[in-house]
Image (cartoon, rainbow, N blue to C red):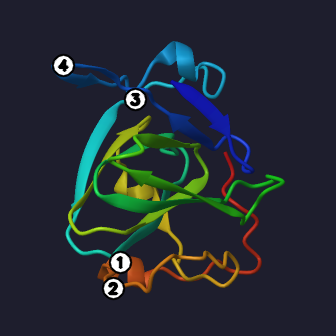
Amino acid sequence: MKLFATPIAGLWEVETAPHRDERGSLTRLFCAEAFATAAPDLRFVQVNHSITRQRGTIRGLHFQRPPAAEWKLIRCLRGRVFDVAVDLRHGSPTFARWHAVLLSADNQRQILIPPGCAHGFQTLADDAELLYQHSAPYTPACEEGVRHDDPRFAIAWPEPATTLSPRDLGFRAIDPAFQGVRA
């Protein structure tokens, strides 16, 4: 397991290495020791699994405000997704910048997203499945989102959006006066 820094501080790409033999394979998805440099006190309290039926679907961009701000570790179990994190942290030198990682069942990569970053993805295959590990429980009162097509971010989604939820379509572009999520 190797962690690679991205242009956004605190956002990490994670490369896993399956151990294979004639029986199949075993892959370590998380190891506190391996993640200690990136997030020394990281502890997951919730695991979620999503299935997105149609290619081109966009989910997000979602985040939770303090006190429920959370780390997310995301892995694609089936299919392929264009996974995006947007830095919304107050005072961050990369505020409003985004970084994307192609996650697939084949490449077995993961992305570790820090608190204060919004997360979203676009499916590049039908029936894409993601596994999410969260460091805080889902707290509806702290949940927020921003538009996937906010011109301030100018995310280069690889395909036209085929499906978005009514909730995601209802998110607004961030206000020009927005200074970021405070810890």
1 and 2 marks in contact (CB < 8 Å): yes
Question: What type is the residue that disc 2 sits on?
Answer: Thr
Question: What type is the residue that disc 3 sits on?
Answer: Phe
- Sequence-wise, the earlier of marks 4 and 1 is 4
Front: mark 3 or 4: 4
- Residue 56, label in figure: 1
Front: mark 2 or 3: 2
Q: In this view, does 41 lie above or below 86?
A: above
Residue 151 falls in image quadrant: bottom right
Question: What type is the residue that disc 4 sits on?
Answer: Glu
Q: Where residue 157 appears, x then y in whole percent?
A: 53, 76
- Residue 44, label in figure: 3
Q: Where residue 19 appears, x then y in whole percent?
A: 34, 20
Question: What type is the residue that disc 1 sits on?
Answer: Gly
Residue at 48 percent of width and 44 percent of height: 68
Side (left or right) of 9 relative to 64:
right
Compute the Cα span from label 4 to label 1. Answer: 36 Å
- Sequence-wise, the earlier of marks 3 and 1 is 3
Residue corresponding to mark 2: 162
Q: In this view, does 136 lie above or below 37?
A: below
Name the residue furthest left: 23
